Amino acid sequence: MRLSLHAPPGSWRQGLCAAVRRMAGRLRAHLPAGDGFVEGRAPRVRALPMPPDGSLLSAQLPDFHHQDTFVLRLQGEVAAGSNAATLLAELLDGFLRYRPAGVTRLMRLRNVLVRPLQLRTSPLGCPVSSLLSADRSQLFAGRHPVLAQQTDADGRRAQVILGADDRHLAFRSCVGVQVTPNGVEISLGTRVRCRNAFGHLYMAMISGVHHAYIVPAMLRMATESLPRRHALSATQGLFA
């Protein structure tokens, strides 16, 4: 447990921990129910047909060809002082520090395939890859490069727009945090405008794995950083 929480993303230690946990999970599935260290199921990621009301994504790329939004709800009461902007900054840190190993491997493969075509490459999943941008003209929380940002006056909702333009497509992603009386809602929405025939072919090839695995895995992994950083303080009781 201790090793798995501190193993660097993509390292041999993270791979070893993942392999041991997979084997332990298969073994545990065949044993009778009893006491254990697992408190509950992983939060469920839901797909929405369109961005939620008030999303900054609604004003981005009006002539888009692809759109999706995924939402993860963390149940529980957020203690005083845990405003949406603070949680959003921690979430963006989570995208950078806690990367699903499977997504990292897929991005490495993608980078090898598209490098001869002179397309953008990044170790991060494309929805948030611009967090590694060298453009520091607009920063969220003083450290995350963004294209746009908004925090409500009451501190209950914060959003940022990420994205980049490439030779085959342009994409914009909206990462949002909304604090509600019953918990916190995390959202990640993406719009894509294809610039040529290869862009349409590229999206047709990746959309399945993007929906089924990449975005849900990134959301779950990034939100796991919140209770570790706020445990017994700001987000105590965040998870049911």
Image: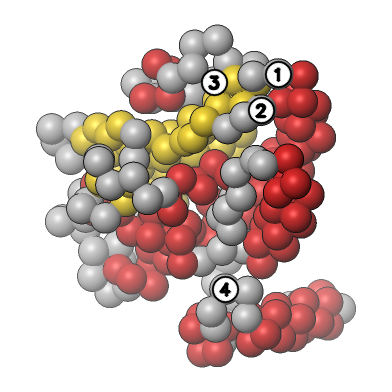
Left or right, 112 with reference to 239: right
Report the amino acid beneath label 4: Pro
Residue marked by disc 4: 9
Residue at 34% x, 34% y is: 147
* Three-letter residue code for mark 3: Met
- The image quadrant that residue 20 belongs to is bottom right
Frontmost residue, 151 versus 23:
151
Rounded to the nearest angstrom, the CA distance separating label 4 from label 3 is: 32 Å
For disc 3, the neighbor class at 10 Å (few under 14, some 14 to 19, many from 20) is some
**Can you tell which quarter of the image residue 114 is in?**
top right
Q: Which mark is residue 168?
A: 2
The residue carrying mark 3 is 50
Circle 3 SS class = loop
Tag 1: amino acid: Asn
Confirm or deny contact between disc 2 and disc 1 (CB under 8 A). yes
Residue position for label 1: 196
- Quadrant showing the N terminus: bottom right
> Does label 1 or label 4 sit earlier along the sequence?
4
